[in-house]
Amino acid sequence: MNKESQKKSGRTRGQFVARVAAQLQRGEHHRALVLSFCGESAEVMACAEPGQFVQVACRDISRPRMSVPQLRRPISISGVSEDPIALGLGNGHCRDGCGREVMVRIIYRVHGPGTNWLAHQAVGEEIDIIGPLGRGFNLPKDKDTRVILIGGGVGLPPMFFSADRLKRNGCSDVLGIAGAATRGLFCCDLLNEADGIEDALVPGKYVREFGPSNTPVLLAADDGSIGFKGNVVQALDGYLKRNEQWRSAEVFACGPKPMLRAVANFCQEHSMNCQVCLESYMGCGIGVCQSCAVAMRSEGKDRESPKKYRLVCAHGPVFDAAKVDWDA
Amino acid sequence: MNADNDKKQVDLSVNIGKVRLANPVMTASGTCGYAYELRDFVDLGRLGAFVTKSITREERVGNAPQRTVETASGLLNAIGLANMGLDKFIEGPLALLARMSVPVFVNVAGKTVDDYIAVAEALAGRDEIAGLEINVSCPNVKEGGITFGTDPKILADLVGRVRQVAANKVLIAKLTPNVTDITVTARAAIDAGADALSLINTLTGMVVDVERRRPVLANRTGGLSGPAIKPVAVHMVERVYREVAGPAKVPIIGLGGIACALDALEFIIAGASAVGVGTAVLTNPPALIEVIEGIEAYLARHGMSSVAELVGSLQ
Ligand SMILES: Cc1cc2nc3c(=O)[nH]c(=O)nc-3n(C[C@H](O)[C@H](O)[C@H](O)COP(=O)(O)OP(=O)(O)OC[C@H]3O[C@@H](n4cnc5c(N)ncnc54)[C@H](O)[C@@H]3O)c2cc1C
Ligand SMILES: Cc1cc2nc3c(=O)[nH]c(=O)nc-3n(C[C@H](O)[C@H](O)[C@H](O)COP(=O)(O)O)c2cc1C
Ligand code: FES
């Protein structure tokens, strides 16, 4: 289905006007924005892959002289579906006379000028979007491969989308690990079951966004305010000690750089494959400005050889963790 | 529909040296890559001309990140001229650029005069390109760059020598605003044989992260672009047009903060024959087309038959 719709429209990305279908509070500081795409944009968005992102114009770009903020803001895609229920909405959100409608969810932390503008966009309002952009996670071809999805802070959203797609591909052994500093900083809807966790290293149905894919999850809060007390790497370590069969799992991770570095180190020590979804400061998001470079490990033995940079927006945002120069 | 009728009467074409552009709007170097990256977003075949990212003799990996930061109505960047180098450019992007229907200018940068000459020589024989824009003004590269554009003697020497090796190509000198008197360097470039001037490149600036007490950009300083620099750029175009380029009949390509047709019109009225759109494309690639259409509509609305009538018409 994917390939077909891509063929029809002939392109894999574009600049589109989306309509706000829903704007929901998630945790204390986050919002989930569900965007509705119609026509060609729906075809293109339907082909988005987990790990890819959109560039959101956080202003009315038809009025360039009102130009704050200038740059678009990159936000990961956290879900794509034609079924609003799969994105946590009711059926009433469908648009009339739209033809094929595809909904895209993004989850963001309300932070500075861009995300504050976004938070003020009400249902029905139009937002200019470029996407889907970048290269997403390499999903395992073998259905029996176990996959562990690790999301820290606002790195969790692409994991919801990964879980959906893994399920669609028939992968059934998928575990989520969601980390945050404290309970209020989880960028998801924590279900009531999360309040009565007895054994923090036994995964459960604690997160609404993991519901459609039926993905069990471990919660890890640095301050122990919910779930496991500690960080995601400690939770992963604890889980693997009890569940040796998961040591062959592939790891997908997204979150703050110190967390990703720790996950990458852990995976290297334990010979686990790990893909990380990186952030960097973006100018364009489409590979023209060279703003978003990240350093990669130089392959040559020559220590003096110049750094090798890759573009997060075009070559990433997902990279093999073993290739990233974490010390740069 | 009326607008369509009006359109036919307006002549948007301009000459840059011996190259005729269908309209005065071009890309700004470094903000539109090598064209193919933008193909999903804008029809570049509608432009007056395309200007590439700076090309250097050898590949350059660029500066350490963070390379860019947004400022109030502006963008500070220190990319460090990251580019694949001359050979790979000729093998790859140039072949794609050759298929473009509009004139292509390759922006050339270097650390030494020999670097510029090597690139200019290699490109002078390529029919795919209409001309060279020499970037004497990139403020990011510590090794040099900046000195070419600020010292009139060094600038004249560079322009003159590139002129010799690329005699058949249109030569544009892209000037830096980081000088005391832009008319001095403008005159030096014209006297040395430049067919046109581009102004302005970015203004050197710094943003400080007060928590870390460090510059935000790893390079410490960067070049400021976007709407924040537009009044500076318009003024420089106006002065250079009035004092140097106008009398010498050398066209100016005005750029710096253009995001819409109104912005471009300011430059044209101040004396620019053509305009470049840079930072605005990063956010909104179709801005390039909106500028062309807006200029056309403006001319029609004011009963003018050609854009040439508007150039330097500042009262
Ligand atoms: C590939 C990618 C995916 C992302 N996914 C998400 C997501 O799913 N949810 C989410 O909440 N956030 C995500 N982010 C981060 C998000 O882009 C920033 O939170 C957002 O730009 C903040 O903008 P602001 O105007 O609200 O805040 P500002 O005060 O302008 O910026 C706050 C911080 O956000 C970052 N930032 C600002 N502008 C940019 C830019 N142009 N490019 C990159 N970073 C920038 C900087 O680190 C800055 O210090 C992602 C970033 C990248 C690169
Ligand atoms: C990200 C970025 C990269 C740039 N790279 C180059 C370059 O390689 N060579 C060059 O001559 N100018 C470069 N410039 C300068 C622009 O071409 C232009 O002169 C300047 O940005 C002002 O125009 P603007 O405000 O429309 O962007 C760059 C500007 C930006 C923002
Ligand atoms: S953000 Fe412009 S190249 Fe990646």
Image (spheres, rainbow, N blue to C red):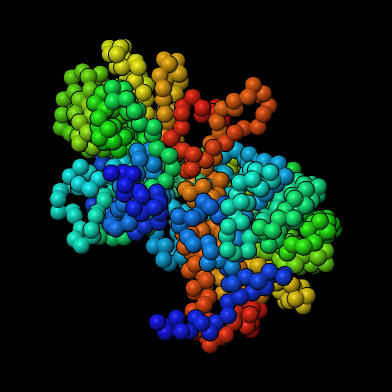
Residue at the spot 35% in from the left edge and 31% down from the top edge:
A139
> Looking at the rendering, which quadrant does residue A221 occupy?
top left
Can residue B128 be seen? Answer: yes
Which of A236/A314 is in front?
Answer: A314
Which quadrant: the C terminus of chain A? top right
Could you tell me how many numbered marks the image carries?
0
* A278 relative to B3, above or below: above
* B122 relative to B218, above or below: below
Which of B255/B43 is in front?
Answer: B43
Classify the position of ligand 1 by quadrant: top left, top right, bottom left or bottom right: top left
Please give left or right for residue B50 compared with residue A127 in the image: right
Residue at the spot 25% in from the left edge and 42% down from the top edge:
A26
Residue at the spot 47% in from the left edge and 43% down from the top edge:
A313
Q: Position of residue B37 (x, y in %)?
A: 51, 51
Q: Position of residue B246 (x, y in %)?
A: 73, 76
Which of A4/B210 is in front?
Answer: A4
Residue at the spot 16% in from the left edge and 25% down from the top edge:
A196
Can residue B133 be seen? Answer: no
> Looking at the rendering, which quadrant does residue A62 occupy?
bottom left
Which of B39/A298 is in front?
Answer: B39
